[in-house]
Amino acid sequence: MEDTLTQENYDILICGGGMIGLAAALGLAKIGLKIAIIEARKPLPFSSEQDYDLRVSALSPKTIDIITELGAWEPVERMRLCHIQEMRVWENPTYGDVTFTALSVGRSDLGAIVENRVVQLALWEIATANENIEFFCPNECADFVLEPGQAIVHLNNGESLSGRLLIGTDGMQSAVRNAFPFGSSGGQYKQSCLVASAKILSPQGKVAWQRFTPQGPQAFLPLTDKQGSLIWYNSVEKIKALSKLSNDQLSEKLSEEFPLELGPIEIEAKASFPISRHHVRSYVHENVLLAGDAAHTINPLAGQGVNLGFQDVSALMETFREETRRNRDWSTPKALKKYDFRRRTANSVMMGAIDAFYFGFSNDHVPLKILRNTALLCARLPLINKQIIRYGSGLT
């Protein structure tokens, strides 16, 4: 795109063309709004011969419904994914062991494990075909200016865009969030996480599992019968040491310390990252709004981070549709505060629940150990089991 100082006008400017930004653009374009997406990098085309990406998400049925409504689930299925039929969780395999099945709630699956880039590519495909959406890529937001009734974004190529609303979906290091006084609370946990992509030599089927240990959880997410994603929480020092091992050495270490259920594996790629949590004090500042990781990051323990982001999008769509249906201005502070209240409240509840779960299980305190294994035992009861599935799947 040529350098220019002209200013183009849109209804909404979206900074960040990842999964959540693209979903927001599609959802708001469906009600006739003109959208500009600013994104630094276009995703690479998909090939079935490509290695599996380390960044995968456990998409809930509710998230799948949202992606389907946006028209992007069929492209996901054209690429690759794994539908999950069972989820097993345990600490003590004798009595603190519970399995959640799709059949128990009358479903064919509990969700799907999908590489993040597959979801992004599917949404990108649909968004580029939408006449209400224009891409500015590769481009970055260099500066932001707020004026009454409009937000102006200056791009790094010298171009300027204006819109009635600016939405920041530019991730954990959000430039939009950092440019305005949203306020934020949170910090680092005392653990790090290792993620590895592996060939599975003993097929696991469409079953995901998570084992709790005093040092932190260990989890397996299937991608195919012969491919999976392994997740290992532990101390910062332990994860740092594991990251330095060769893939063959790490394969041996995982076989030693992970449950026997895993069987033999071959590590193909690995990465590690610190675990952090943050939550903005408000999702709205004047005519600027945040969604996804720009507004909140959650402990990845239960795989809810991406799902919460898509629920942000769903709330945006619902709020704007409601205002449009009643012939009201969707960009007023009153309308935007509806979104803020809906999502900040719901996300706070989920983040608190995940933190309680995390701290309750990541220790060797005897009374807590008895309590949590009793809780897992109770989770076997049909009524409780079904309710947990519905809540975790976003079906309630």
Image (tube, grey):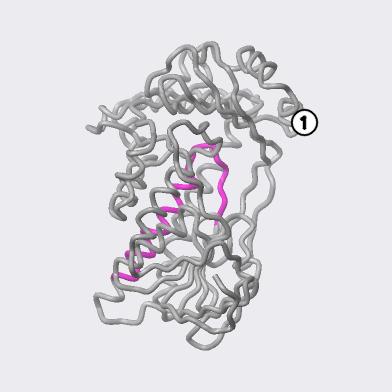
Q: Quarter-wise, where is residue 39 in the image? A: bottom right
Looking at the rendering, the stretch of residues picked out in magenta corresponds to 296-321
Disc 1: CA contacts within 10 A as few (<14), some (14-19) or many (>=20): few
Asked if 319 appears above or below 62 in the picture, the reply is below
Asked if 145 appears above or below 267 in the picture, the reply is below
| Residue denoted by label 1 | 237
Where residue 343 sits in the image (x, y, percent)?
A: 44, 60
Q: Residue furthest front?
A: 2
Where residue 196 sits in the image (x, y, percent)?
A: 59, 28
Asked if residue 299 lies in the magenta stretch, the reply is: yes
Asked if 139 appears above or below 172 in the picture, the reply is below
- Quadrant (top left, top right, bottom left, bottom right) of the N terminus: bottom right
Task: Identify which residue, 294 or 163, lies in the foreground.
Answer: 163
Count all numbered tags in the image, as a single digit.
Answer: 1
Where residue 374 sits in the image (x, y, percent)?
A: 47, 24
Tell me: 297 left or right of 114.
right
Task: Identify which residue, 377 or 252, lies in the foreground.
Answer: 252
Asked if residue 261 lies in the magenta stretch, the reply is: no
Name the residue rendered at 52%, 83% in the picture.
7
Q: Residue furthest bottom?
A: 148
Tell me: 255 left or right of 126.
right
- Magenta highlight: main SS: helix
| Callout 1 amino acid | Glu
Name the residue rendered at 57%, 43% in the picture.
299
